[in-house]
Image (tube, rainbow, N blue to C red):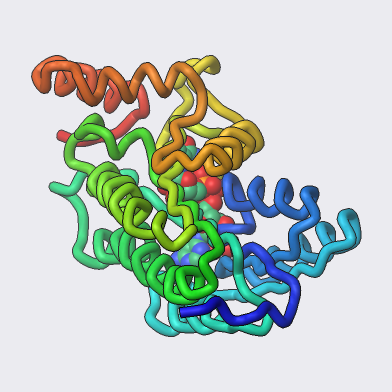
Amino acid sequence: MPAPPRTGPARALVTGATAGIGAAFARRLAADGRHLVLVARDGDRLAGLAAELAERHQVRVDILPADLTTDDGCLAVERRLAESAEPIELLVNSAGISLARSFLRSTVEDEARLLRLNVHAVMRLTLAALATMTVRRDGAVINVSSVAGFGAVMPGSTYSASKAWVTNFSESVGQSARRYGVRVMALCPGFTRTEFHQRAGINVSKMPDWLWLSADDVVAEALRDLGKGRLVSVPDWKYKAAVFGLRHAPRGLLRAVGGDTRARVGRDER
Ligand SMILES: NC(=O)c1ccc[n+]([C@@H]2O[C@H](COP(=O)([O-])OP(=O)(O)OC[C@H]3O[C@@H](n4cnc5c(N)ncnc54)[C@H](OP(=O)(O)O)[C@@H]3O)[C@@H](O)[C@H]2O)c1
């Protein structure tokens, strides 16, 4: 099917744009001259960031407040992704959460909320984006996953399992989308300084400084890897080494390291 002609400027849509890695994507893409659509729940914070980026970089920045754990929130973003007048050429699914407690002490409500945001929303928005991108034969999706998805290093946590899904899903869909000229990539950062751990109530005070990445560096490496056509991006050499270990080390050793990690990040998994 021939690609429909573009009738307006292309832009990027970033979820989780008010903080952390999503905000770093928004800043970098605006600095690169991209028009943006920013999604998160906090409308005031979205509006503040949009005004700042529009003024500093002379780009158009629209905001779309939405709670992506809800059907209405996902539907609003799906509708925007389907608009052909101002097509979305890059979707970044960055919104995501973790929980600070063991599955053994969790609730259905909390676990369902995590899965709705980390898995269900990512599936829905990727599907909506690919519907138009594959017809236009142009576009890319970055799904923010995690190094945690490569192994059960946080025993009792559904977070790692949700990120294993995001990485596997993105790598798989990325192979199907390639033949349409569309890229899908899983971005798998390690510990990154954002609001993430504080929001979840995870105590990271014992984590050594050298383990931390900056959100700006994560985004720069992600965009480089997307340009190279990678299906999975793991920023920073120390986390590349960690992923190699997680993929190839004996499971018993990983379980022992997992227990140690759990102690250092102050989780109560007993
Ligand atoms: N930080 C790390 O160490 C790390 C490591 C590996 C992977 N990651 C992944 O990186 C991604 C971004 O995390 P981050 O570290 O940047 O976290 P963050 O600083 O806490 O930012 C999370 C963003 O998601 C938005 N959000 C949260 N719940 C939402 C909902 N229900 N609907 C819509 N938006 C929602 C938040 O805005 P509102 O509150 O305004 O909605 C915020 O903009 C996540 O997928 C996370 O799993 C993080």
Judge by depth and name the residue closer to the eye, 267 or 11.
Answer: 11
| Vertical placement of residue 195 versus 218, above or below | below
The residue at the far left in this view is 252
Q: Position of residue 72 (x, y in %)?
A: 44, 84
The residue at the far front in this view is 2
Judge by depth and name the residue closer to the eye, 5 or 187.
Answer: 5
Instruction: Identify the residue at image location x=15%, y=34%.
Output: 270
Instruction: Identify the residue at image location x=52%, y=81%.
Output: 82
Residue 101 in view here: no
Q: In which quarter of the image is residue 164?
A: top left
Instruction: Identify the residue at image location x=44%, y=31%.
Output: 234
Instruction: Identify the residue at image location x=30%, y=33%.
Output: 267
Judge by depth and name the residue closer to the eye, 262 or 92.
Answer: 92
Residue 85 in view here: yes
Q: Where is residue 67 in the image (x, y as percent from the top left)?
A: 48, 73
| Vertical placement of residue 152 versus 22, above or below | above
Q: Position of residue 181 (x, y in %)?
A: 48, 58
Number of numbered labels in the structure image: 0
| Vertical placement of residue 265 versus 222, above or below | above
Q: Position of residue 258 (x, y in %)?
A: 22, 24
Judge by depth and name the residue closer to the eye, 208 or 132.
Answer: 132
For the N terminus, the image quarter is bottom left
Side of 212 relative to 154 (left or right):
right
Q: In which quarter of the image is residue 101?
A: top left
